[in-house]
Amino acid sequence: MNIMQKIVTLTVFLSFMIPIVVLGRSYDIYVDASNDSGTEDGTSANPYNTISEGISAALLNDEDGREVYVANGEYQEQVHVEEDVELFGEDRSNTIIIGRDRDDDDFSYAVKMEHGTKIEDFTVKYGNTGILVEEDSRATIEHCKIKSFDKIGVEVLSADRNNKKIFTMEDCKIYKGDGKAMYIRKRKIDIRDNKIYDNEEEGIDLRSKVKGKIYDNEIYDNGESGIEFEMRKTKLKIKGNKIKSNDSSAITAQYRGKNEGGEVLIEDNKLKKNDEFALSCNNPQGGVPPVYYFSSSITMLENALSKNDSGSYAPMCQF
């Protein structure tokens, strides 16, 4: 037997001796509130009947296989979307997360999102906060309705200002809330194609050091400003929005005792019929901003400003 024949013979022999390892395959998880059969394994034939059970099962999968598909129905539970889990509702008007307990007391939040998570095609109703995005988390909300919350519709906590931790919200409705529709701390954002209306306080409230884009939204009939932001180290592009009929100004920029300015482009928006200014500039905590503090940090370009009760610009803006 020559050397090549010996190698082939040894290879064939070893192939029988080495055990075959079958790697587990990630699989989709299914949830249906109407399943009362007593049999639940997360398959489409035997779905879990709570979203929380579906998330727990998804966490056993690899990070790239944690999709949970939720059938139409009402889910009265506090939903914690843990790392890399993606939730998909059947229909955003009929797949409903109820953020209250059986005594109709609001949960502190209806949905909490961790890093790498997504929620799509749900109605999120009630809760002190409708959806809470945790610190240092990349999260995406698409094609959802957030409504009837007690304090904040979507609250987004701080993160590094880069794509790895970006917060994205697209094609959603936030409405009929008793407080702010959105409250966002320092991080990178991409907020576009949403309707934000009929809330008791601001449409979008941004604290200092927020960076990103607010494009093509409709923001109207809110109890305070359509968009409010702190100027300090803020880098925003606010473009293509329709901001109208809010009970304060369309857009409000704030100085809060820190001299650092920002870079804010406000371009091609329709700012009309608001109860105060198209653009208001103020100092709610007192202190005197440097001369031209606002006008040196804000660029107004090709906006349509009309029928705002107090005029186009507040005096402190110095345009």
Image: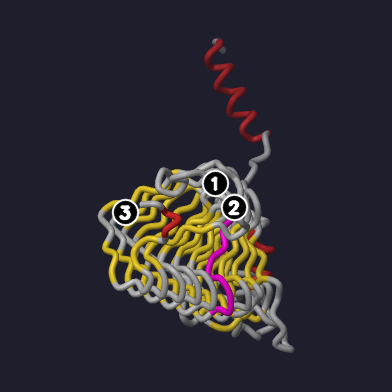
Q: Which residues are magenta?
A: 177-185
Which residue is at the far bottom?
103
Question: Do the residues bearing badges 1 and 2 touch, measured as CB atoms within 8 Å?
Answer: yes
Q: Residue at x 63, y 71 (%)?
A: 129
**Residue at horizontal 54%, vertical 78%?**
200
Which numbered disc, 1 or 2, marks the residue that appears first in the sequence?
Answer: 1
> Local crowd at mark 2 within 10 Å, few (<14), some, or many (≥20)?
some
Image: 206 above or below 199: above
Q: What is the total number of numbered labels drawn onto the structure image?
A: 3
Q: Is residue 62 visible?
A: no
- Asked whether 316 or 184 is in front, the reply is 316
Residue identified by numbered label 3: 267
Closer to the eye: label 2 or 3:
2
Q: Residue visible at 65% across and 78% down?
A: 99
| Amino acid marked by disc 1 | Arg
Q: Residue at x 63, y 60 (%)?
A: 58
The residue that label 1 is drawn on is 232
In the rendered image, residue 263, in percent from the top left (x then y), is placed at 44, 44
Considering the numbered disc 2 on the image, is that residue within a helix, a strand or a loop? loop
Say above or below: 205 vs 224. Answer: above
Residue 275 falls in which quadrant of the image?
A: bottom left
Badge 1 element? loop
Q: Quadrant of the N terminus?
A: top right
Mark 3: secondary structure = strand
The residues tagged by marks 3 and 1 sit, at their Cα atoms, a distance apart of 20 Å
Left or right, 108 with respect to 206, comes to right
Q: Is residue 262 magenta?
A: no
Mark 1–mark 2 distance (CA, rounded to whole Å) = 8 Å
